[in-house]
Every structure is written in C-alpha cells, then in structure tokens.
Amino acid sequence: MSKLYYPNKELAKKANIKSLEQYYALVDEAKNDYEGYWKNFADKKIDWLSPYSKVLDESNKPFYKWFCEGKLNVSNQCIDRHLEKRANQVAILFEGDRGDVQKITYKELSLNVNRFANLLKNKFDIKKGDRVVLYMPMVPEAAYAMLACTRIGAIHSVVFGGFSAEALKDRIEDAGAKLVITADGAYRKGKPYLLKPVVDDATKNGCDSLEAVLVIQRNNEKIEWNKKDHKYNELIKYESDQCPYEIMDSEDPLFLLYTSGSTGKPKGVQHSTAGYILWAQMTMEWTFDFQDGDVFWCTADIGWITGHTYIVYGPLSCGGTTVMFEGVPTYPDSGRAWKMVEEHQITQFYTAPTAIRVLHKLGEDEPSKYNISSLKVLGTVGEPIDPHAWEWYYKVVGGEKCPIVDTWWQTETGGHMITPLPFATPIKPACATLPLPGIMAEVIEKDGTPTPIKEKGYLCITKPWPSMIRTIWGDDERFKKSYFGDCEKNGESVYFSGDGAMIDEDGYITITGRVDDVINVSGHRLGTAELEAAIAEDEHVAEVAVIGTPHSVKGESIFIYVVLKDNANIKDIFIHVNKILARDIGNIAKADDIVKVEGLPKTRSGKIMRRILRTLAKKEEITQDISTLEDPSVVEKIKKALESS
Ligand code: PRX
C-alpha cells in the first residue's frame, strides 16, 4: 500500500471542509436525499433572479435538466453581486509575458464587461442564443469577452490559440458563429506573435454565418484589415459602462467548448447556465479550499475547460482574485512561475503534470530560490501524474506542507469530479482519491457490476450531476451514443467517461488513462481518428494508424505508422506528415515518431490492431496471438521498419 500523506491539522481548522468525517457526512447526505442535497447548495450559492420549480427533471434521459425554470445571470453571479463588498478588490491579476502587470478590480471588471456587452449588442447585433467564437491570447479582454457574452445571453465558444486555421474554421462553421473575437497577436517568450492571420485564413472561404471579426489590439503588430474586421480598442471607447444583464434560464446554454472524441470530428460540448456555475463555485471552495483573500493561479489557457472553470468562472463566482498569465513558466527562465508566486503572494497553484515535469527537469532547486511560503494548496489536472513528479512537487514546491489535489475531470463534467479535499483527505501520491460529495463516480464493468478491487474497470458517473454536459451542439444522437451508449447500471444507461480506473480497498480511485481511441499529449486531448482522417486525405497516403506512446515529459506522444501509395514521392515523411497535422489541427498535434511501413496489422474483417502497434512502438514483445491477422508477416516487417527508422 502506498504511503498516506495526512492533512495539516492546524490548517484544517480553518478549512471549508475540515475533516474526512465532514466529507463522509456530505457523501451520506447526497446518498440519502440526492435532490435535497443539491437544492441546499443551489439555494445558498446562487443569486436566483427567480426561483426554480424542480431540482432535477429526469423525464427525458439522458437529457437531464437541473433547477428547472430558475432564472439567473452568470455575469451577475461573477461580478455584480460582489460589487457592494468587493468593488476595490482585485478580480483579475494579469501578468504579461514581458512582466507587465495589470490589477483589475471588481469595479473595473464590471465597467469593462458592461462596455464589452454593449459593444456586442449595439455594434454587432448579438442577441441571446447567438454564438460568438473567441480565438484569443491570454489577456484580460478574453475574460471580458466571455463574461460579456454571458451578460447578454450569447453562447461563447473559445477556440484554443494553438489550433490551426482549418480547425478554427470547422468550429466557426459547426457553431454557426456570427462573430469572431480575436487579437492582432500577443507576446510569447519575449517576442510578439500574430493570431489574426489565422482568423483571416480560417474565414477566407465558407464560414457563411460569420458577420464580423472584432480585433483587440494587444501588440499593435502590422496585420491586414479586411471588410469584416473591426477595431475593439477604438469602438469600446464609445460604449456605455452600464448594460443590464439578460435574465437567463437555468438550462440556457452558457457556452460550447469543442473537444476531441474517439470518432469523427470534434464535439461541441454544451454546458448549461445554473448547474455549471454552481459546481464551478462549489469546487473552488472545496477542492482548493478557496477563501477570502486568496490569490489563485491556474496556469491553463482559457481555450480549455480548465481555463473556463478555474481562471474565469470558479474564482470570480467566489468573489476571488484570479491570476491570468500571458507567458510560459519557463521564460525568461525556469524560475518565472516561482517568482510570480512570491511577487503576487499566490495561495493556490494549479497546473498540468507536463508543466511540473518540465519545471522539475529545468530547475530542480529553482523553487527554493524564492519565498513561495504563501502557497497553501497545489493542484494538478489533465493527465496522470507519475510518483516521481509528484514527490518533487510535494517536497520542493510545497515544502511538504501543501496538500496536492490531483483533480480528475473532463470538458464534459464542467468541474472536478474525483479529487482529494486538501484538508480532509489523506493523500496517496498520484491518486485522484475520492469522488466529491454528490458525485456518484464508480468503477464498473459494462453491465454495471462493480469491478473487483485493484482491477481495471470503466470509470462511470452513475447519477446525473448539475454541471454535466447537456448535449453535443447540434447532435443529440451523438451525445447519447458517445456518453450513454457503453455502460449501464441496474438496466439504465450511465455516463461513461472514456477513462479506465482502479479502485482500492479504501475506495480510492486511480485513473489508468483513456480506454478509447483518444490520446493525451501534455494534457491536450486528441482523437486518433481525427488525426488519421487528416493524414489519410493526403494524396500520397494509402493508410495510416495513429497511436499514443508513453513520453517522459508529455505523458504521451503521437506515434504514426504510414503506408504510402506505390507512386508516392516524398523525401521526408516526418516533415510531410507533421505539416499536414499543423495545417489541419495545429501545432499541438505534432508527432514525435512517424514510421513508414509496408502494411498495418489488421484482422480479417479489416480492423487495425492498435494494441499490436502500441506494443511494437514501445519495443516490447508481442504476446497476443497474431495468427488471426489477415497477414501475420506484416508484424516482422514493421519491426524491421522500426529498427531502421
Ligand atoms: O483521460 C482523462 C484526463 O483528461 C481527460 C479529459 O480531458 P479534457 O476534457 O481535455 O479535460 C482536461 C482537464 C479537465 C480525462 O478523460 N485527465 C484529466 N484529469 C486527470 C486525467 N487523467 C489522470 N489524472 C487526472 N487528474
């Protein structure tokens, strides 16, 4: 059994959840009266503009509805309701790549968001329900834009700035967006870079729904100005700083966020208004023990769900101070993050295992050069953390006093699902530990029987929860099939996460990784089917198979087997295929290994045996039976190709 790390008893006294007993009492409350449990929190945490009539409507499964007919507005929840008490408190603490700092108070945030909301309404005729795509760097205007959308009831869809023009175009078209908000560019590693040309490229053909592009001038680099383009910095001056918020229904869509699945094109995960914001706020308070005066830093990009929930909506709904960082933690050196912790007196630091591994590798002792004693809780997210990185994070960054919350969740879950509570849960390194109270996470077989202890099973959530995905934008059938088509319990379909997991004798859950064809590179989720589709379209490619293979820093890396057409004439397959991926998906999809092979291992029915490809990539012995392959000799040929590559 792995060593347990117990919470600090002194700090626990002041914590939001103080003990394991308190945790189990909440778990029991949820078990005994599920709707009553959620009602209690919804009543306490949300500023209802008019009350809901029913906690949970299960009449059209799996299209669950929460807090039916309740009315609220998320920008009120994140801004207006705090103004009386917190007008002069810093809401967003922005640090630019070059060290420039902006401290935006709640009052200033309010003025900026109101002006932005008026601009969207008056200039671009954005109405409730319209979709607005954000393709933005990490600057405060990105948060203003998100909150301005929520203020007027528009549905934002933030596209990560690392996605290519092609990927951006797909997302604009799928959402039927009326407006794109972008920036000329921003700064990275001390240098300006451009974003706007990617939008130009994405929108030069198609994108029929698009009426305008609003450009924030961040670095004033020279860019092309087209007919549809508008300058934010000029237009915003004329807008009033008063914009009444729209009255939204609990179930009105709050935002879309595209993510990769195991099949086909990316899915527009649709989140709701009330359920999402409730859980964003509750998990801030529980998982990070977020309290008045805390300065919270989540290093994610707002293009991912982590940035949505734990840079913008979670911290601000709590009336907290959230840090937003434009740069990278390794510039100008690997002490940057720790310098920021010291300077801003950061209390919670939340990042991905890949970043921890990089910071560890580049600066083993770097944290000790700074006074980072303000830290109270450390967090990780997005991929499994290995015990080695965990130990360094715990000892050197946390000084053996900060609990590490290894938070398991997904774009689809809206907020944390399985995680230690920092001052209640005894922690096992690299283990997500226990489900949050009210979250019915279970490790089961497909028929719902509990998987025996310490064996791999399917990680399912067996009851609906408020912040769950509502549907896939425009594709209810795909939603049902993707999440409710695999596993059931007591004869009813339940949400399957796509992850495998193991449960131990203490009920602790360890995530073992995806069991579907999704890979996780540096915490970025990529569907192998999506990558394969992009490559297969190339005129030189006959067949392709993409797998994930273990990587010491990135967790997993992309490994590609390509069969070229007979007449193909390609000098460098590595460059050729990576160019396709950069063009169609973006630089996050760069492969580390690309091997030219003569054929792929397939069953007689034509299914590619990825397990064999994974084993071969790891240079391990094949133990499975290959005699059933259509052409068993292909395995030896691949081995040879790997040796000479
Ligand atoms: O495989 C799990 C992994 O990340 C996937 C979700 O990716 P995404 O929707 O992009 O959201 C990432 C940020 C929430 C999951 O299906 N994952 C997430 N957190 C963990 C994790 N794997 C292991 N441990 C975690 N703590």
Image (spheres, rainbow, N blue to C red):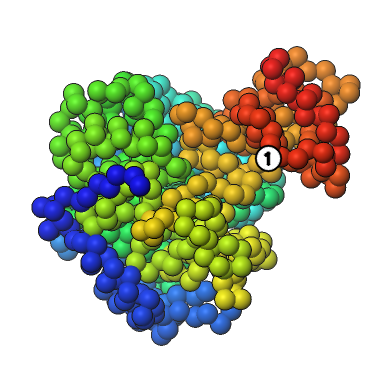
Is residue 394 at all visible to an observer of this figure? yes
Q: Is residue 452 left or right of residue 439?
A: right
Residue 364 coordinates in the image, percent (x, y): 29, 23
Q: Residue at x 13, y 53 (%)?
A: 9
Asked whether residue 258 is in view, the answer is no
Q: Is residue 192 left or right of residue 516?
A: left
- Residue 180 appears left or right of 3: right
Secondary structure at badge 1 equals helix
State left or right for residue 429 relative to residue 155: left
Query: Around disc 1, counting alpha carbons within 10 Å, would you say few (fewer than 14), some (14 to 19), or many (20 or more)?
Result: few
Seen as rendered, the residue at the extreme right is 567
Q: Within the image, what quadrant is residue 630 found in? A: top right
Instruction: From the top left corner, tell me how far across and down residue 537 is, in percent.
Output: 78, 36
Please say if 78 is above or below 327: below
Residue drawn at the location 23% of the way across and 57% of the way down: 424
Q: Is residue 296 above or below residue 621?
A: below
Q: Residue at x 78, y 25 (%)?
A: 636
Q: Nearer the viewer, residue 223 or 8?
A: 8
Residue placed under numbered mark 1 in the picture = 611
Number of numbered discs overlaid on the protein picture: 1
In the rendered structure, which amino acid carries the disc numbered 1? Arg
> What is the x, y in percent for residue 637?
79, 23
Seen from the viewer's position, the closer of residues 298 and 378 is 378
Q: Residue at x 25, y 23 (%)?
A: 366
Up/down of 431 relative to 299, above or below:
below
